[in-house]
Image (cartoon, rainbow, N blue to C red):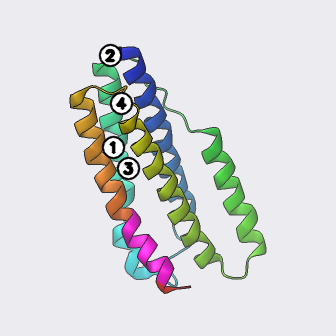
Amino acid sequence: MENKKTVEVLNDLLKITNDRIEGFLKVEDQLWNSYSHLKPDFDRMLSASQDIKSELIGMIRQNGGIAEDTVTTAGAIHRAWIDLKNSFTGDKEKSTLENVVFGEDAAIKAYQDALDSGDLTDEVSRKVLDQLHHLKASYKKFENLEKLNQ
């Protein structure tokens, strides 16, 4: 297995993690009037995302790569869509919550694709799988809340 492919996959995950961080920062304070009980979970998600980012950068460097510390085009479009959608919707908090769930779902799929690609070393796969477990746990909290509010 080439380190080059491993680095490419890790850089993709880094960009997705940066999308998550940007997204969390964008929606922060838009949920707390109705969902104040979620703030501690949200803060943990943001902190975990920052830890994941650091881990990914470390793995990229360990595999001889240079971290592409940017965001994805799709993520930027999604954040712009959140702004547009929120400008037209009556329930901005519910819409924001739906967008958090959508973004988490996309991140989970990207992580699973990375694991399924066969381009990661065993050690990197274990670390990425641990990160995926964190993503799934946070997704469940927000997904369950979204279902309750439909």
Please provide percent x and percent y for residue 97: 54, 71
Please provide percent x and percent y for residue 94: 59, 78
Magenta stretch, main secondary structure class: helix
139 or 41: nearer the viewer: 139
Q: Nearer the viewer, mark 2 or mark 3?
A: 2
Q: Nearer the viewer, mark 1 or mark 2?
A: 2
Q: Identify which amino acid the numbered label 1 is placed on.
A: Ile
Q: Identify which amino acid the numbered label 4 is placed on.
A: Ile
The tag earlier along the polypeptide, 3 or 4, is 3
The tag earlier along the polypeptide, 1 or 2, is 2
Compute the Cα span from label 3 to label 4: 12 Å
Compute the Cα span from label 3 to label 1: 5 Å
* 12 to 142, vertically: above or below: above
Q: Identify which amino acid the numbered label 2 is placed on.
A: Met
Label 1 element class? helix
Q: Check the picture and name the quadrant holding the N terminus.
A: top left
Q: Is residue 125 visible?
A: yes
The tag earlier along the polypeptide, 4 or 1, is 1
The tag earlier along the polypeptide, 2 or 4, is 2
The image's mark for residue 1 is: 2
Crowd around label 4: few <14 · some 14–19 · many ≥20 (10 Å):
many
- Any magenta on residue 106? no
Residue annotated with mark 4: 57
Q: Are marks 3 and 1 in contact (CB under 8 Å)?
A: yes
Magenta stretch in the rendered image = 139-147
